[in-house]
Image (tube, rainbow, N blue to C red):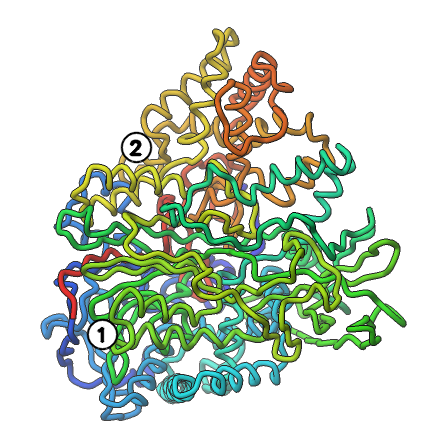
Amino acid sequence: MPRRTPRTILDRLRTPRRFPKFLKSASVCVLIAGLLSPITQAAAAPAAVTAAEDHCGGWCSDILPPGENGNATLAEILLNQAFGTQPSHAEDQLAPYGKLPSGYSALTDAKINDFFNNASFGVPSDQVASTTRPAGRSDVTIVRDKKTGVPHITGTTRYGTEFGAGYAAAQDRLWLMDVFRHVGRGQLTSFAGGAPSNQGLEQEFWRNAPYTEADLQAQIDDATAGNGARGQQALADAKAYIEGVNAYIDASDKGRYFPGEYVLTGHKDSITNAGTIEHFKLTDLVALASVIGALFGSGGGGEVGNALSLLAAQSRYGVAEGTEVWESFRERNDPEAVLTVHDGQSFPYATKPDDPKGRALPDAGSVTREPLVYDRTGGATASAATAATARTTATALSAARRGMSNALVVSGEHTASGHPVAVFGPQTGYFAPQLLMLQEIQGPGLSARGASFAGLSMYVELGRGQDYAWSATTSGQDIIDTYAVELCQDDFHYLYHGTCTAMEKVERTNAWKPTVADSTRAGSYRMQVYRTKYGPVEYRATVDGKKVAYTTLRSSYLHEADSIIGFQMLNDPDFVKNAGSFQSAVQHINYTFNWFYADSGHTAYYNSGDNPVRAAGVDPDYPVRAEAAYEWRNWNPGPNTADYTPASAHPNSVDQDYYVSWNNKQAKDYSTASWGDGSVHRGNLLEDRVKKLVSAGGVTRSALVKAMADAALADLRAEDVLPDLLKVLESSPVTDATASAAAGKLSAWAAAGARRTETSAGSKTYANAEAIRIMDAWWPLLVKAEFEPGLGSDLYTAFTGNLPVDESPSAAHGPTGAHAGSSFQYGWWSYVHKDIRAVLGEPVRGALPKKYCGGGSLGACRDILISTLKEAAGRTAAQVYPGDDQCSAGDQWCADSIVHRTLGGIKHGPVTWQNRPTYQQVVEFTSHR
């Protein structure tokens, strides 16, 4: 039987048998018939959208599965659960997205829109599906196209335009917006139910951003006051947007076409319509932004985990040698790492100081995680609930942030048309409904089409303007530091500049009871965080025998709303007119992102984020003493402001021959917080393919899409590391029959391209399935056998806490657990690559200080590879792919498959794995203003 895993929010709605008996069989039909009778939403007669100035010439395309419509009435949810029917436009972008892996090899420019949507401005009159004038307003219309149902919002006033954007967002994502404003406040369980995964989700985010309502409002006030006319305009835009959202809430409540999840979670009554859907307010936008920032835009942290692994290395080897070993595995500035800015420019940041000062390493065995949850009752005491808390705690020691987005941009000098070509987009996980939504927005000072996070769509956040397009990938540079605050008086007071100061306790109490959507038994708990001027307390320890609290301070803490100005600029056609003005716009975004730009003649790149200027001698990889000498320069703890590195010090470039990014290292000497930027990174999969295209010249849109799609199916281990492993195996004849057969299968797979692809479209069976099974089983066995003997079990375990050994498609990782698509971001591929090459006697830049495989002996290393390969070959498919709530044990294709995790009542079927952005653009502009 499949193994069951914790479910997120409304995952329980996916299986009809979880509905009570009165919602089954014939009763479903009766209830649906009654629910279809309420008044439907009124719409004006269809009318064409007059296109704004559009310089793409029909060569802009995009895709965002599963579909634009993320709202479903109760009747539509019940129909979906009972019969599998889909609401209009709920999954019409899923099929073309899912077909690219089997169709990309024959792709031509003419066929791009077989797999993407035309992203031109406007809607031709014969493609208009509906026209809505929300709340009877004469200054805005929302036109939806027939193919995808994307809203095209056109306003004659700025207020009306933003009102329409809010109305359209609520039309498409009201339930999701409501879910995530509660996630951001740490109140998900009391809103959507006490499922263990809900408990874990709210705990994860509230620990990182434990804001009070006053904190949320202060962020709005500060962002408005500090940005002049643009700040005032952003506030007016946000207010109009919120009023549009609330207008839809009122209309849908009166017309009874609001999302059915409100009924299933007990907020509304399906018969009497009693109950309330709470209006949105401005502070909800900040709560939403804090979730998105934590997920994708806040690099750094992990200093305590770094300290623990350093201590383990020094315990194993002594201080000097242990530090050298630690630094070699850290790979802060590996000379073999793939770079986004590869023209030789150096951008030093977060580098290792020659003479570290203020370091606050914990005493051995003294570190404990600060408790978050207290006073558990009922459903909060179940083992699954406490396990969910443990999972959120276990990830805290690592600085790893899930990036998952990629970009391929080629300058016009190397394209067939002479115009730049870009294929780029964010990978935000796979959800139903999707976290992002599509829209076109046209009004005074606004002209853009693309994707925005639901509830934050007053502006397009990733997309295209009249004659330019932009996108982002998560960069992960270090904007988070850990401070060791010395305790005084008791465990809840600390020294701040010599004065014993009380910590501030912030609490959140949540309670829930069973609903149709979530049968978790009634329960409650209290979350509690202690805050200091140096940020929230994360750990407690002793340093040199003195009690300390380790706190986490990030530059974007209390500044979740600041980035609104940059997004406003990106949507303003009078501001962004060229590469330079684009870079000026994204400099106003304080989240850690890599930004890419293309117009008809130029390309550009800029790395955003408020990078704090650290005190001289501070090593950002370790905790530092909470003393004035080691604080960020000119740091003001009240508003959490400091000096930040100037724009020129951020990796940036204009018109480089090409850019690639897959959350890899940005530039020479620019140290990212996460481990794993070494010789093998998934960015290499893009680098190798795009570099080859650029060398040949004449790059087209379809050629760049094919390069992306081919990289999206590649197994990084098999493409970049397996050839060296085979060299070791083949250094002498392999006499063991099992190992020899396995090596032959792996070799044949590598020769065929090392891709994880179906035998044919829809077969749900991999070509080279046995080789893939062997590699999936072999890698963790190989890494452990190669490195643990030399490192020792304690240090090996500590290093795997800093960097996971593997991240294969079937592994549970990322914000959605398993079936998340994104793979091969974090792993020991570089370590194996460097070590095996060293054992083979090949040159290695940035080599590890020791040879680990077989102690450096080629013969002994070969014996390790053969023995682990033989063991892996003997693992059955059921052992390698044990099954879960989606798949039976042994189903290899299903284990890899992408599943849109339900955040509402509508479910979708799985699609074949591809390592690809969720939202993606293909752009080539033919002219410029």
For residue 693, what is the image quadrant? top left
Left or right placement of residue 417 versus residue 309 in this view:
left
Q: Which residue is mark 1?
A: 144
Of residues 543 and 48, the one drawn nearer to the viewer in this rendering: 543
Residue 543 image position (x, y, % from top left): 82, 55
Task: Please say whether residue 558 is visible from this viewpoint.
Answer: yes
Check disc 2 and give the amino acid type. Answer: Thr
CA separation in Å, label 1 and label 2: 38 Å
Task: Please say whether residue 31 is visible from this viewpoint.
Answer: no
Secondary element at image label 1: strand
Residue 766 image position (x, y, % from top left): 36, 33
Residue 894 image position (x, y, % from top left): 42, 42
Q: Height in image: 711 above or below 116?
A: above
For residue 571, what is the image quadrant? bottom left
Near mark 1 (Cα within 10 A), the count class, few <14, some 14-19 or many ≥20, is: many
Near mark 2 (Cα within 10 A), the count class, few <14, some 14-19 or many ≥20, is: some
Q: Which residue is mark 2?
A: 759
Check disc 1 and give the amino acid type. Answer: Arg
Q: Residue at x 23, y 42 (%)?
A: 103
Question: How many dots with numbers?
Answer: 2
Of residues 49 and 81, the one drawn nearer to the viewer in this rendering: 49
Q: Height in image: 387 above or below 510?
A: above
Reading the chain from its start, which is encountered first: label 1 or label 2?
A: 1
Residue 636 image position (x, y, % from top left): 64, 76
